[in-house]
Amino acid sequence: MTLARLQLAGIAKHYPGVVANSDVALTVLPGQIHAVLGENGAGKSTLMKIIYGAVQPDAGEVFFNGQPVHIKNPQQARALGISMVFQHFSLFDTLTVAENVWLGLDQRLSLREVTRNIERKATEYGLGIEPTRPVHTLSVGEMQRVEIIRALLTQPQLLILDEPTSVLTPQAVEKLFVVLRQLAAEGCSILYISHKLHEIRALCSACTVLRAGRVAGVCNPTQESNASLSRLMIGTEPPPLEHRAQQPGAVLLRVRHLSLAREDQFGVALQDVDFQVRSGEVVGIAGVSGNGQKELLRALSGEDCRSAPESIAIGRVDVSRHHPGHRRSLGLHFVPEERLGRGAVPTLSLAHNLLLTRQEAIAMPHLVGGWIRVRQLERQAADIIARFQVKAGGVHALARALSGGNLQKFIVGREMDAKPRLFIVSQPTWGVDVGAAAQIRGEILLLRDAGCAVLVVSEELDELFEVCDRLHVMARGRLSPSLPVGQASVEKIGQWMSGLWDVPQAADVAA
């Protein structure tokens, strides 16, 4: 009989008004890639934090390599051979990549040695990153690569991955899967949390499903379908999207020859970016994280006001040098990729987080003469929570108390509820379950059908193919020509992600 690498028995964790885990049992064998599946708020992240020592359980036992253990903190977990890559990253913005990695490793290694090890691992696993870059200059996708490399450098016996592919391209996902299969072949056990059912079926040999903090079932995902896994996870299958063809209207966003020098040595310069988004259409921008998407979004939102005059227009208004508040008054609403810190203030309630971007909305019943009508504000927040099925302890719940997926639903709902003329969203379904992803994508199409101009920046190609009418690809600060979704393919978009849209396709040459 094979001794289990990890075994949990009777794990329970309660928070005020919330049961995160209740009587959870889990067994992971050596060399096994074991999925943990569940909708947002099902208790997956709490359970992983218990295994990693970041959260202490109220009840239950943990066994590692057959021995009972009480893991008091992440340092003890790492000493045992447990590493974790969090969905919300644990990096210090003011430190470099190498310094961040160094903090979690054996301090007997010098920073120079750690830098060399990062470069070696990055090359070995195809996770390109510069060790000397400050973390605050990285995109979300690049931060994720840092977390993965840091975990791999600890040579773990058990590796916990929370949504590891949420901001990776299909090609990068395949490379990561090669790495994970190799690690498993060498005896490393992997706990894999993802909402991407096709990934779980392709990668994992076992799956534990959580629902409302309890184990709803254990299965072999290779013998399941996406539909059966959805039923186990949320009790039903997500409804199919209705993407009706329609004629777009007037141009609501026009970007003309936008070029911007990078703000620091690690940024990406924008080079002659030119595109438009019309009312009643969804335009997507694909690309590997760190190719200028962050810089473009900052220019569009008004966070970076260095754009040359006449380079960015909303409707007929030149907003190139206008601040975010004025752009919101023209109907622009924006969802950034960073949930905590930019999308929401962690220490504010959900109701008070509405005030971040809704002061310039047309309907502003909660502000009168400088005073806040708290009850009306709370009713608005409650409506968003109900409409987008956000699992939270009410309108007074702090943003930081929500799971990543539920916070994403609230932020997206907050901006959609403002009835925007122009809606720009980055990574709209990052870290949300299949049911919530289907709902958010459906709401994007409803906005489009109501005449809103929608720009979606995402690294989920399946998502872009589902909701977009036209696609661009961003590579090294340049933007590809527009491509109707009906003419796009994973292979073609993958080639364009390398900046090769000027290279004729074989079929084109033959024609």
Image (cartoon, grey):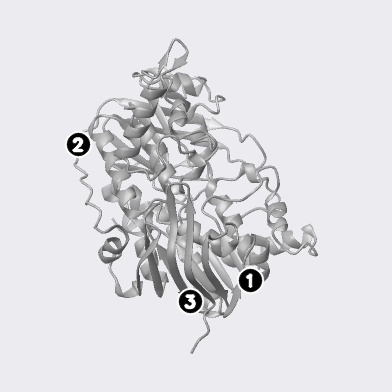
Q: Are marks 3 and 2 in contact (CB under 8 Å)?
A: no
Using the numbered discs, state the Cα–Cα distance from disc 3 to disc 1 in whole angstroms. 15 Å
Q: Which residue is mark 2?
A: 246
Q: Position of residue 313 (x, y in %)?
A: 41, 23
Mark 2 residue type: Gln
- Report crowding for label 1: few under 14, some 14 to 19, many 20 or more residues within 10 A (C-alpha): some
Q: Which residue is mark 3?
A: 32
Using the numbered discs, state the Cα–Cα distance from disc 2 to disc 1 in whole angstroms. 55 Å
Q: Is residue 436 left or right of residue 446?
A: right
Farthest top residue in view = 369
Q: Is residue 9 left or right of residue 461?
A: right
Q: Nearer the viewer, residue 316 or 503?
A: 316
Looking at the image, is mark 3 or mark 2 earlier in the sequence?
Answer: 3
- Report crowding for label 2: few under 14, some 14 to 19, many 20 or more residues within 10 A (C-alpha): few
Looking at the image, is mark 3 or mark 1 earlier in the sequence?
Answer: 3
Q: Secondary structure at mark 1?
A: loop
Q: Quadrant of the C terminus?
A: bottom left
Q: Are marks 3 and 1 in contact (CB under 8 Å)?
A: no
Residue 374 sits in quarter: top left
Q: Position of residue 366 (x, y in %)?
A: 39, 19
Mark 3 residue type: Gln
Looking at the image, is mark 2 or mark 1 earlier in the sequence?
Answer: 1
Single out the mark in the foreground, 3 or 2: 3
Q: Which residue is mark 1?
A: 81
Q: Position of residue 47 (x, y in %)?
A: 49, 61
Rendered view: 302 above or below 486: above
